[in-house]
Amino acid sequence: MFFLDFFRKIKFVSGAYHFFWAYFSALVLGFPSRKIKVIGVTGTKGKSTTIDLASRIFEEAGRKTASLSSIRFKIGNKEEKNTFKMTSPGRGYLQKFLKKAINAGCSHAILEITSEGILQHRQKFIDFDAAVFTNLAPEHIERHGSFNNYRAAKGKLFEQTKSIHILNLDDKNFEFYFKFEAEKKFGFKIKDWQKLKEKNLEVIKAEGFQAKEGMVNFRISGVEFILKLPGKFNIYNALAAISIARSQGISLEVCRQALKKVEGIPGRMEVVVEKPFKVIVDYAHMPDALESVFSTLLEERSQNLGSKLICIIGSQGGGRDKWKRPNMGEIAGKYCDKIIVANEDPYDEDPMQIVKEVALKIKDKAEIILDRREAIREALKSARKNDIVIITGKGCESLMCVKGGKKIAWDDREIVREELQKLNLKVQNSK
């Protein structure tokens, strides 16, 4: 008890508290990562989708797999929602998760590794077989102090992993991660550029790619892939997942078979209503992610002349990344016909101040409706045939964080269904 009390007292002045818990839990549980192959996935966007796709490929290959992401915790066939409002909880949760995976007979565990988790040493004392880099854009800058610090924090995963590195070669930051040494490297890309001269590098390139309504298709070494997920960004997510599989000796054909069965990812461009207008829920909560979502939907909307793109945006995480708020509003103003700025997860910050900052650059175009349920109702009421309603920021999250540390049960998808029922609108729900 003396040591626990000691580390609690110093946890606010150093990382020793979190380091202790990582070591203590690994020690007590017998360093579980030594008995299972662990793959860590880091980056700004696409981590959860990559993990979901990779897990499905591993299962198709007959490998019992555990996965941990901001969406859910899954061990074999058993899964539960991630209700912690954080990707990987502290106090040795990752070590306990790996121990459970081993006890369940899993051969692999795929973990989402965040910069915050790295700052708090949650990845320490885990022997990673592979480290994956999806992409990088400014995020958590206030927490890290600068973009370079944020990038460097994620680099610690690659510094720690000596066996396999998997990198998005089309991301302008890939060279930072490429410099870390590994026994084998895999790179995935879509773009054409000069080949890297690296003996231990295997490049996986998507060719002939097309993004149609609600799906993408591409080829890798002559193998045709069809993925029923929208947007070019999902090609990169698929490439990351395929690269993970290839690094573990899984064939492209198995990857193809697994990915063609995917019908959607919870909270990621998830279609809640199909007709007469479409309602989509997405986790996008950073400017570049928001732009990717809107640009994808703009292409879809162009197929129905006269239709409108109606969005609900906010600013996830009160007290964090305040710089992004006016940028997000500006992006919405660029793509959307009707913009409703609503509450998201204010924590202890004034919700009205947050939404005003989001609406700063689009004052004439933005409608502020602080109550998120009321905002969803208004968006649904204003939608007409062939319109698209996109609700961003929370995805499949089941909680809203408000003042005083309180958490309110919330799910954008369920709120949509409830409000549609109240409005007595005849719609065709998604599967």
Image: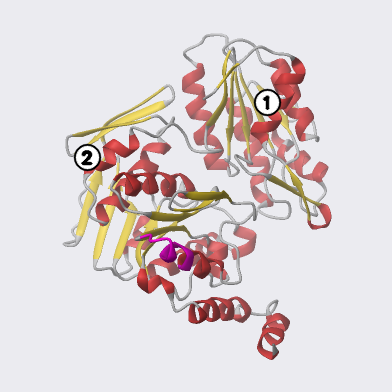
In the rendering, at what x and y percent does residue 379 appear? 71, 22
Q: Which residue is drawn at 53% across and 41% down?
A: 289
In the rendering, at what x and y percent does residue 10 appear? 69, 83
**Placement of 83 over or under 283, stated as above or below:** below
**Placement of 70 over or under 233, stated as above or below:** below
**Who comes first in sequence, dot 2 or dot 1?**
2
Q: Which residue is drawn at 49% across and 35% down?
A: 292
User: Which of the pair 34/379 is nearer the observer?
Assistant: 34
Q: Distance between the residues labelled 2 and 1?
A: 38 Å
For residue 186: magenta? no
What kind of residue is marked 2? Glu
Q: Give the range drawn in magenta.
A: 99-106
The residue tagged with tag 2: helix, strand or loop? helix
Label at residue 268: none
Q: Which residue lies furthest to the front in this view?
A: 104
Classified by dominant secondary structure, the portion drawn in magenta counts as helix
User: Which of the pair 283/339 is nearer the observer?
Assistant: 283
Answer yes or no: is residue 367 visible: no
In the rendering, at what x and y percent does residue 237 appear? 39, 43
Label at residue 253: 2
For residue 100: magenta? yes
**Circle 1 is placed at which residue position?**
417
